[in-house]
Image (cartoon, rainbow, N blue to C red):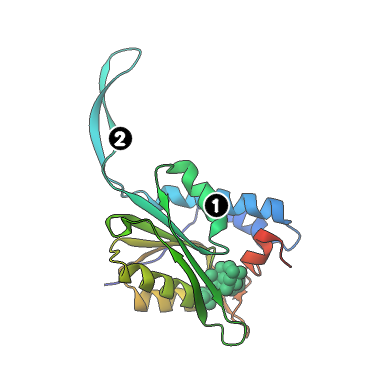
Amino acid sequence: MANKPFIMDHPLIQHKVTLLRDKNTGSKEFRELINEVAMLMCYEATRDLPTKTVEIETPICIAKANVISGRKIAFVPILRAGLGMVDGLLQLVPAAKVGHIGMYRDHDTCEPVEYYCKLPADIEDRDIIVLDPMLATGGSAIDAIDQLKAHGCKNIKFMCIIAAPEGIEALTAKHPDVQIYCGALDEKLNENKYIVPGLGDAGDRIFGTK
Ligand code: PRP
Ligand code: URA
């Protein structure tokens, strides 16, 4: 059975996603917000990390306390827009490695075209969180995860800030094992396959290219 997508309902995330949607939010603030939302979502996406008990000495006494044990993590942003989420996540998990998959949607067909892939050498041993602010048709996420599975990756999560129902459905159908974390679930795609109401073109807004 496919995992149910995890739609964030935290007020801080909802507030920041609303600011992202506003067309008057400029690139500097937009970049900061993307990182902040990614960081808040990381809290939920890492909830299942295993812990072990160690002995430490506090200023008061010897105590047993938990630390994260063993698991190795990789973040894999889908270029370009996924890059905007990386720093937020690395602030919480600084030991994670980062792989990159470059993909753009062809303007006429809206089909993803892969142009770059560079992954950590031990990627198949890592728990992976694929990052992309937008899950529209789902084509880019599906192809990126296909690529990771072709490299032997097994434990994969997908984190996006805004998703369309069409993207959730397509990604869940193709990769039912991948847990989706999503900051907001929107209404639909428009005739150009943009998310409605969405936030526009995430890459252009992060990098100021339009
Ligand atoms: C955007 C977005 C996703 C993709 C989502 O990237 O960042 O990667 O579209 O659409 P899909 O679910 O229909 O595949 P875009 O193609 O605009 O490339 P960019 O990040 O380089 O601007
Ligand atoms: N890519 C974006 O950046 N925005 C959308 O709404 C759809 C795809």
Question: Please, what is the three-letter code of the amino acid marked with disc 1?
Answer: Val
The residue carrying pointer 2 sits among few (fewer than 14), some (14 to 19) or many (20 or more) residues within 10 Å by Cα, namely few
Marks 2/1 in contact by CB < 8 Å: the verdict is no
* Nearest the eye: 206 or 200: 206
* Nearest the eye: 97 or 193: 97
Question: Label 1's element?
Answer: helix
Ligand 2 location (quadrant)? bottom right
Q: Earlier in the sequence, mark 2 or mark 1?
A: 1
Image coordinates for residue 27, horizontal then vertical, percent: 71, 56
- Name the residue rendered at 57%, 56% in the picture: 84
**Residue receiving disc 1:** 37
Residue 84 can be seen, yes or no: yes
Q: Is residue 209 left or right of residue 143?
A: right
Image coordinates for residue 61, horizontal then vertical, percent: 28, 13
Image coordinates for residue 123, horizontal then vertical, percent: 33, 58
- Name the residue rendered at 56%, 78% in the picture: 105
Q: Can you tell which mark lies on residue 164?
A: none
Question: Please, what is the three-letter code of the amino acid marked with disc 2?
Answer: Val
Q: Can you tell which mark lies on residue 67?
A: 2
- Name the residue rendered at 57%, 50% in the picture: 35
Spatial separation of the CA atoms under disc 2 and disc 1: 24 Å
Image coordinates for residue 34, horizontal then vertical, percent: 59, 54
Q: Is mark 1 within 8 Å of ligand 1?
A: no
Quadrant in which residue 3 is drawn: bottom left
Q: In this rendering, is residue 149 above or below 12?
A: below
